[in-house]
Amino acid sequence: MLFLAVFCGFLAEYQLEHKIESDRGKQYIISMYEDLKMDTVALNVIIQNRKRRSEMLDSVFFLMDNPGDQQSDLYFYARHLTRTAPVLFFNNDRTIQQLKYSGGLRLITNKMVSDSIMIYDKQVRLVLERQESEIATIRECLAYYYKIFDGRVFLKMMDDNNVVSRPLPSPSLLNFSEQDANTFLGYCQAIKAINVGNSTHSKVLKEKAVELIEIIKNKYHLE
């Protein structure tokens, strides 16, 4: 009888522990689900901003060759060249960090879900690495950027909310050499190529996020 009582106690404790872990796993999944929805919203904005960024870079190429009386536009588009905040993605990683580094991933018992989380995380890290390359290229471009554009004009173009407006009246460019212009445009071309690549990776990441959201919804009957 004593053995049976101890054994039943052990089973009850095991079942309780299993339920606790199952509940914790479900909470991780719900938290991950919310993170993914926020990531998807952010990626939609970033993809649109990257499209606009490519258009602005095309305008810089055109206006550098055909400045005419449109130097106000040239300053406006060039100022956006160094603004990375609208196009950089920073994922909501509160849950995935816990899953990876606190042993939470073992609580996700559905293999399809856990595998999909790791695939998504890998794509996130690829996007973040490519963004670092983009930032580095922009920093290299700045040495030639400020040989062409007057930094005092850029300062006047920013309001208190950090919004950029076209400078009026149309400002002049600095006295720059053909070589400086050529090097600057070379960096612009590199930035555009990186921007296009990062836009593509952002679209792939969005697809992975949407796929993972659907998998979680189906496997855990959310919403």
Image (cartoon, helix red, strand yellow):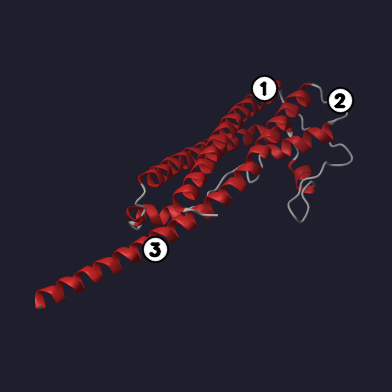
Q: Nearer the viewer, residue 109 or 95?
A: 109
Residue beneath label 2, please? 68
* Location of residue 134 by image quarter: top right
Image position of 69 (left or right of 20):
right
| Residue 120, x across and y down, in percent | 46, 42
Q: Nearer the viewer, residue 46 or 13?
A: 13
Above or below residue 216? Residue 122 is above
Q: Between disc 3 and disc 2, whose residue precedes?
A: 3
Residue beneath label 1, please? 182
Above or below residue 6? Residue 169 is above
For the residue marked with disc 2, what is the amino acid?
Gly
| Residue 119, x across and y down, in percent | 42, 40
* Location of residue 13 by image quarter: bottom left
Q: Could you give the CA–CA distance between mark 2 and mark 1, rounded to whole angstroms?
A: 18 Å
Q: Between disc 1 and disc 3, whose residue precedes?
A: 3
| Residue 218, x across and y down, in percent | 48, 47
Q: Nearer the viewer, residue 177 or 190?
A: 190
